[in-house]
Amino acid sequence: MNADNASSRIALITGANRGIGRATAERLAALGATVVIGARHRERGEAAAASIRESGGDARAVALDVTDQATVQQAAEEIEERYGRLDVLVNNAGISGSGNAAPQDAVDRVPSAVDLAVVREVFEVNVFGVIAVTNAMLPLLRASDAGRIVNLTSHAASLTLYADPQGPLAGLPSVAYSPSKTALNAVTVQYANELRGEGILVNAVAPGYVDTEINGNTGILTPEQAAEHVVDLALLGGDGPTGGFHSADGPLPW
């Protein structure tokens, strides 16, 4: 990461009023970027943006529900009117489908018994929502001289890791959350391939087991630790990678 790349950058982070999204917004703002806090509830986004401004950063909030096309389009219009472009899109918003539950208590652990409505809900946010937001923001990213898209994925997206019966994920089956992140990885590669020639870099990053509500606050990493790797990809130089599946420890197996 080149911290100088943050200066004058405009960055939108979805689901940024808490957790990894908020930590990412705070880190980018501390480095000099203008951050746009995307939040389903505008008042929560406004509170997060106000906190960043109190710390000396530049932040605004937009109402953005990734499953509501009207709010997605309105957010794009607000960003265009205020800034005229977007340099960084961080697709952070996501759900597990199990509420604030630890992985071992998730409701999607048994494929043959899963509630299909849960699977649909998870894919709606974690996959279709990313496509909706990305497509709405692409005209603004194309107006940037260094567009970057970072998609928040998971180690659990790795088919290689899951296919190993002795691997680290063998005891944590998932038929909603994990497959949604596998699909997100595939979507990431497709966007990377389309946008490669335009200089827009698109990557997926697995932040690790982070202490957030999505896992019942059972994680061992802080949101601030996770945000470091997100920000690294958000501020890549022009010679940086695209279409990758990254973690703090390097590339992950697909």
Image (spheres, rainbow, N blue to C red):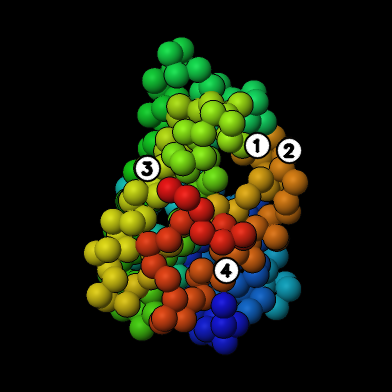
The amino acid beneath tag 3 is: Ala
| Mark 1: secondary structure | helix
Residue 71 image label: none
- Which comes before the other along the chain, label 4 or label 1? 1
- Which comes before the other along the chain, label 3 or label 4? 3
Q: In this view, does 112 lie to the left or right of 17?
A: left
Asked if the residues shown at circle 2 and circle 1 are in contact, with their CB atoms under 8 angstroms apart, the answer is yes
Q: In which quarter of the image is the N terminus?
A: bottom right
- Which comes before the other along the chain, label 2 or label 3? 3
Asked if the residues shown at circle 2 and circle 3 are in contact, with their CB atoms under 8 angstroms apart, the answer is no
Disc 2 target residue:
218
The amino acid beneath tag 1 is: Asn
- Which comes before the other along the chain, label 2 or label 4? 2
Residue found 57% across the figure and 68% down from its top = 231
Disc 3 target residue:
183
Give the alpha-carbon distance from disc 3 to disc 4, as whole Å.
22 Å
Disc 1 target residue:
215
Crowdedness of circle 1 by 10 Å Cα count: few (<14), some, many (20+)? many
Residue 45 shows in the view:
no
x and y, in percent, of residue 131 in the image: 33, 51
Q: In this view, does 169 lie to the left or right of 183?
A: right
In which image quadrant can residue 84 be found?
A: bottom left
